Structures are given as C-alpha cells and as structure tokens.
Amino acid sequence: GAGVSQSPSNKVTEKGKDVELRCDPISGHTALYWYRQRLGQGLEFLIYFQGNSAPDKSGLPSDRFSAERTGESVSTLTIQRTQQEDSAVYLCASSLGRQTGQFFGPGTRLTVL
Amino acid sequence: QQQVKQSPQSLIVQKGGISIINCAYENTAFDYFPWYQQFPGKGPALLIAIRPDVSEKKEGRFTISFNKSAKQFSLHIMDSQPGDSATYFCAGGYGQNFVFGPGTRLSVLP
C-alpha cells in the first residue's frame, strides 16, 4: 500500500520568500506530525494534528511557521519570510492510533539561499 | 516534553559483531517504545517496538531489552552487517505523543 508522501522532495528558495510543503498521510491515519531535521541532527518536533485539529503546536519555532490539515487527509506546512536557519529536511509522519508507531515520509529538503 | 536520552552518539562495529544502543527516559506515562532506522536521504523507518509489560522483544537480528524500574531500554543488533549502517533513533510515546532520542550513527565495517 502507499506510504506517506511529501512534496516537493527538494525546494530551493531565496531568503524572505514563503514556501509551502505538502504531506499526504497514509489513508485512515488520524494523527499527523511534522518534524524538522537539520543536517546530522535528531528530530525536532514541530506540530501534531489529530484529525484536522492541532492539539499540540508547541514545537513551531516562530510565528513564521504555520500548518493546516484538511480533514484526516493532506497537510500543508507554510514557512513565511524564510531565513537561512530554516534550511533543513522537513519530515511528515502519520499514525493510526495508540501504540502503533509513526510512519514517516521521505521528507522535503529545504534550502534557503 | 520530557527528554529521551540516547547513547552512544556514534558507534563503529566490525561485521558480525553486536551493536548495542542505549536509551533512558523520564516520563513514566510512556507506554510504547519504538526504534527507528534512518538511511541517508530517507525518512526514519519503524524497526521494532516494545510495550512496558514485557522485558524483551526479538525480531530477527534485532532485540529490544526493556528495564521498567530503571527506565531504560536498549537495542541489540546481532551479527551486524554493513547494510545496518544507519542512524538509529529510540523514542518514548503515550497516546499520540512521541519524544525521540537524539540518534546514534552506526557504522558496520566490512
């Protein structure tokens, strides 16, 4: 079956531009997560959706970052006025429920020049 | 979110050897402990997971040992192969909340 997909796979943008990153979770997965991973680093939690509500936005690093989710489907992470420190791989994961683990997409590599 | 500590940061093992990665957690509400394997340029992939009501789980060459009283768990990779070279992340979870360790970079020498 299809896994988690993310698009684009790579995004190069200029400082100050806005970017939108897309995540398509596994069908039926109610929970959706966004993480940021800088080169050689661990996973930095950004936001978690249960359905289309976001009970935990605690990881968003600034008000330039926002995310939304349509029902229990696609999610979009938007970064406004990008900065060079936003350069990283942005990973999306989905989960079916308790004690089932998360399934990750391949990530979007964002480079801000 | 409370931390999950992971060690070592990096590990080099000869082919055929045993790789051991250790994690410690703080949040006693955690009821699910997965391990993820990440190859360069790929997203993490769920490798094996354990619940706190068992002390050990084995899947092929991969074994999780769990010590609830010490709040520690470890991943053992038996007969390590060069193809196991990757970054490994442990995590603790409860409900839909997950906290990841910082990762261990494993290199298995041929």
Image (spheres, coloured by chain):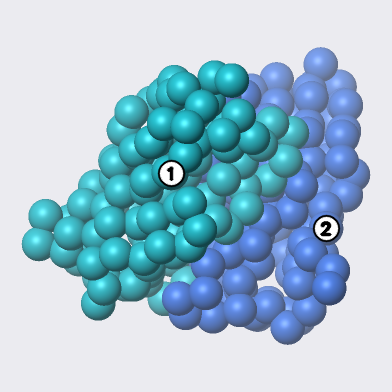
Chain colours: A blue, B cyan
Label 1 secondary element: strand
Residue drawn at the location 83% of the way across and 73% of the way down: A1
Label 2 amino acid? Answer: Ser
Structural distance between the alpha carbons of marks 2 and 1: 29 Å
Q: What x and y, as percent, mark residue B62? A: 45, 53
Q: Are there few (<14), some (14-19), or many (20+) residues within 10 Å of tag 2?
A: many
Q: What x and y, as percent, mark residue A67? A: 70, 58
A55 or A26, nearer to the observer: A26
Asked whether, in this view, residue B9 is left or right of residue A63, the answer is: left
Asked whether, in this view, residue A32 is left or right of residue A14, the answer is: left
Q: Chain of mark 1?
A: B
Q: Are there few (<14), some (14-19), or many (20+) residues within 10 Å of tag 1?
A: many
| Residue bearing the label numbered 2 | A5
Residue drawn at the location 41% of the way across and 31% of the way down: B17
Mark 2 vs mark 1, foreground winner is 1
| Residue bearing the label numbered 1 | B77
